Image (cartoon, helix red, strand yellow):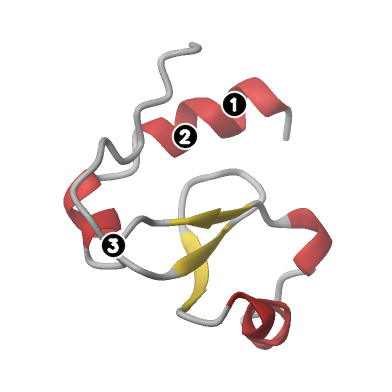
Amino acid sequence: MNMQEYLKNRVAYPLDELAKHRGEWIAWSPDGTRLVASSRVPDALDDLVRAAGENPEDCAIEGIPETDTVVGGLDAL
């Protein structure tokens, strides 16, 4: 998977689904199409990602702000 495809998939992820994870850290699948794991404690993500069958080094980590902001605004495409 290349970065452009990851970003294309990531930006297409539904914002209402991301909003459910406010105040959490999330791990994205390597292709950016799904959330692999989420936690309020970022240090817990590696174990959660492994438990989901993914390699933590292949998953992008992102913090979702608690307050209203623009979530998912990747205009670089």
Q: Nearer the viewer, residue 19 or 6?
A: 19
Assign the N terminus to one quadrant of the image. top right
Q: What residue is at 47 percent from the left and 34 percent from the top?
A: 9
**Residue 21, position as x, y percentages in the image:** 31, 67
Q: Distance between the residues labelled 3 and 1?
A: 27 Å
User: Which residue is labeled 1 in the image?
Assistant: 5
Q: What residue is at 25 percent from the left and 45 percent from the top?
A: 14
35, above or below 51, in the image:
above
Q: How many marks?
A: 3
User: Which residue is labeled 3 in the image?
Assistant: 66
Secondary structure of residue under mark 1: helix
**Residue 27, position as x, y percentages in the image:** 57, 63
**Residue 46, position as x, y percentages in the image:** 72, 78
Q: What residue is at 55 percent from the left and 82 percent from the top?
A: 41
3, above or below 46, in the image:
above
Q: Residue 11's quadrant in the figure? A: top left
Badge 3 or badge 1: first in the primary sequence: 1
* Neighbour tally class for label 1: few under 14, some 14-19, many 20 plus, Cα within 10 Å: few
* Neighbour tally class for label 2: few under 14, some 14-19, many 20 plus, Cα within 10 Å: some
The mark lying in front, picked from 2 and 3, is 3
75, above or below 30, in the image:
above
Q: Look at the numbered discs 2 and 1 and tell me whether their residues touch, using CB distance below 8 Å.
A: yes
Residue type, mark 1 in image: Glu
Query: Is residue 58 rendered to the left or right of residue 69?
Result: right
**Residue 20, position as x, y percentages in the image:** 23, 66
* Neighbour tally class for label 3: few under 14, some 14-19, many 20 plus, Cα within 10 Å: few
User: Which residue is labeled 2 in the image?
Assistant: 9
Badge 2 or badge 3: first in the primary sequence: 2
Q: Residue 69's quadrant in the figure? A: top left
Residue type, mark 3 in image: Glu
